[in-house]
Image: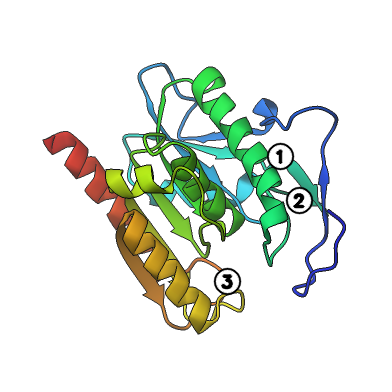
Amino acid sequence: MNRPNPFGFPPVERIGEGPARIDVSAVRFFPHAPGPQDRVVILLHGLGSNEQDLLSLAPMLPGGMVYASLRGVLACGPGFAWLAPPPLGADDLGLLEESAVALEHWAHRVAPGRVIGAIGFSQGAVLALQLLRRRAEALDWAVALSGAPFPAELPGDAALAERDVPVLWGHGGQDPLFDAAMETQVRDWLQRHARLTEELSPTLGHGIDEQILDAVAGFVRARLAEESSS
């Protein structure tokens, strides 16, 4: 986990011993802690960040749900992470799977209410998609911001394509982590494995701007409308 990386990110390190676990004391909720009847949307931050990052977006997203912002299970400099820094290789799948299992454990055994969706940025987007690739029924929908699916074929991909889960992919046209070839690969994969909504902000780098945030709010609102009409 101490390998060099061309983007200059700090290496990631394990926290403690034994299997990775979500730190329940670090989970932050908006607008309140969920009860058994609440619907929960998980917020998954990017490399080197923490649980406070995406929580700041929650007040600008549709209400009627509880947003739960989780801390990554690996240390990365002063922040946290879900897997190794980019570029990702096949040997990085193990860390991603550990993070996914930790999140599943939290969602199924610890989190009050029912987890219905995930909004992930960068590494958090990889993890949100990984939850669906592990079990297509894990989420009703997902938002992947400035992120991509893990670059390998996985056993659950066929089931995910069959289910046609709504996925919003929001990204910037000036993102240094995405060249034109990678952008095309991600778009093709999502079109084949999900019901894709794409939002491209032409001048945005690796981040979230007002255009992307508006798209996320609209996407979540549409999912709520679909749910209420079914």
Tags 2 and 3 touching, CB below 8 Å:
no
Is residue 118 in view from this perspective?
yes
Cα separation, mark 2 vs mark 1, equals 10 Å
Q: Is residue 204 above or below residue 48?
A: below
Q: Is residue 115 above or below residue 45?
A: above
Q: Earlier in the sequence, mark 2 or mark 1?
A: 1
Q: Residue at x 46, y 72 (%)?
A: 185
Residue annotated with mark 3: 206
Q: Identify the disc placed on residue 73.
A: 1
Amino acid found under the numbered disc labelled 3 = His
Position in image of residue 30 (x %, y %): 48, 36
Task: Rate crowding at label 1 as few (under 14), some (14 to 19) or many (20 or more) other CA atoms within 10 Å.
Answer: many
Dot 3 falls on a residue whose secondary structure is loop
Amino acid found under the numbered disc labelled 2 = Gly
Position in image of residue 154 (x %, y %): 51, 48
Q: Residue at x 20, y 37 (%)?
A: 227
Cα separation, mark 2 vs mark 3, equals 17 Å
Residue annotated with mark 2: 79
Tags 3 and 1 touching, CB below 8 Å:
no
Dot 2 falls on a residue whose secondary structure is strand
Horizontal arrangement in the rendering, residue 3 relative to residue 229 (left or right):
right
Name the residue nearer the viewer: 221 or 143: 143
Amino acid found under the numbered disc labelled 1 = Val
Query: Quick one: which residue is furthest to the left in this view?
Result: 229
Position in image of residue 95 (x %, y %): 70, 45
